[in-house]
Amino acid sequence: MRLNSSFAKLLRRTGALALVLALLNSAAPAGVLPEDRADILYHRYQGGGITIDGPSVLIRKKIGDSLSVSANYYVDMVSSASIDVKLSASKYQEERKQKSVSVDYLHGKSTYSVAVIDSKESDYVADTAVFSLSQDMFGDLTTVSLTYKRGWNDVFRNVKLADGSKVRDPTFTDIADSRGYSLGLSQILTRNLILGLNYEVITDEGYLNSPYRSVRYFDPGSPRGFSLEKEFYPRTHTSNAASVRLKYYLPYRAAIDGQGRFYTDTWGVNAWNVDFTYTQPVWKRWIFDGHVRYYKQTAADFYSDLFPRAQSQNFLARDKELATYDAITVGVQASYDFQIPRVRWIQKSALTARIEHMTINYDDFRDATATDPANGILAGAEPLYKLNANIFQLFLSIYF
Amino acid sequence: MRVIRILLALTTLVGATACSPIQPWVKPFEREHLADPIMAFDRNPVSSAYLDHVFEAREGARGASGSAGGGCGCN
């Protein structure tokens, strides 16, 4: 049987909602339709025994003066031998394909947006609809946005047959629905400074854990000193997140961007992060960005690296994304603007490369594969797990 | 007596401005810097959406990472 990593599981859940930002939320202020452009991107994540790569293509085009449509095609090709997989299963490969379409309608100072997203893989099907309204006011100094997201997800479980082929387990199927409500404000403070505020509530109901992942508990009768049982999460989850962002134009044509976010949820996870980006154009055609992000969270109430016994409590989790940890991400980006000769319909083009390095230090998630009682490494005394990952993007942007 | 005078002056001031529309304190012609592409909250949506996607998958927290659907209102 295949074991899904928590990362791959979360990729499904978050993929639609995160990528819809590219379609709806970020392209332009209300009252102005986003510019026509096409982006062809290659992305690659590598770390913790997982490699995920694939393409993403985003095309946006205005139709008349008040309508803009966009379409995105995105693929994750997953090859996973994560620490979860190593503990209780074998390496697997998976592919997720996501298609989405959005329409923005501009009427006066208001922009109405609708998007639909469809994500499919062998054991998870996710459909999402997003409705958004943005309104410019006070002489276009202020933009207020309201967004509602609704997700319908079907969860399956794959099993491996004797011949090595993979099929859906006919005895297991479940659903997970989600709703998200967000309120945003963008405010010009001075001729060089913009403020952004966001508040978002997301609530999920249904099968929210992985059908593959296990927790571990003390078992003196086992050679390793622990045994495994299936994780079991509550069937509801509601989160609140609020962020504040400031972006400042420096006197010598450069920009500095700072963001802070606070998060709390009904599972007991509390988190905050800060994010800074410095942008510097040079030599007319180049733009360089430097980025640093720090993130910290507390564990979920029902998380434990090692439970005292089997079925020791109602809800059981050993997902490292629900553990206590902090993470730091550092990255750089370089973008080169150029003209394609003799192609008149292309106004300008840009080639951009971006690399980020992420380090996560877990405070209560141990490397259970390092258990070795013969050499004195007992269950619960293994070294704490540390994850290093590289995130790479290369993309071509065409403005027409 | 001095406090009453100050309060009276403030009340008069607020009363006099209550019905007038809010005037933009940064005029459209003063938004040159804000209109620069480097000041966009999201210069490359396809790239930042992917990175948000990675962070959201790797972190327990989620939500409120967007840019409020707005920019500088300066185009």
Image: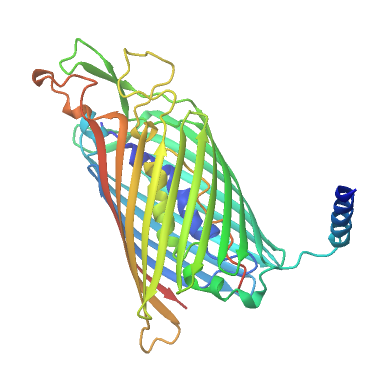
Q: Residue at x 35, y 35 (%)?
A: A325
Residue A242 to residue A28: above or below: above
Residue A137 to residue A323: above or below: below
* In the foreground, A121 or A66: A66
Is residue A394 at least partly visible in the picture? no
- Return the x and y of residue A42 as percentages of the image width and height: 32, 61
Q: Quadrant of the N terminus of chain A?
A: top left
* In the foreground, A166 or A78: A78
Residue A9 to residue A368: above or below: below
From the viewer's perspective, tell me whether residue B53 is left or right of residue B34: left
Extreme front residue here? B1
Number of dots carrying numbers: 0
* In the foreground, B62 or A56: B62
In this picture the colour scheme is rainbow
Identify the image quadrant of residue A343: bottom left
- Return the x and y of residue A3 as percentages of the image width and height: 28, 33
- Return the x and y of residue A360 as percentages of the image width and height: 31, 41
Is residue A320 at least partly visible in the picture? yes
Extreme bottom residue here? A342
Q: Residue at x 39, y 57 (%)?
A: A74
Q: Residue at x 44, y 45 (%)?
A: A273
Extreme top residue here? A221
Q: Residue at x 51, y 61 (%)?
A: A247
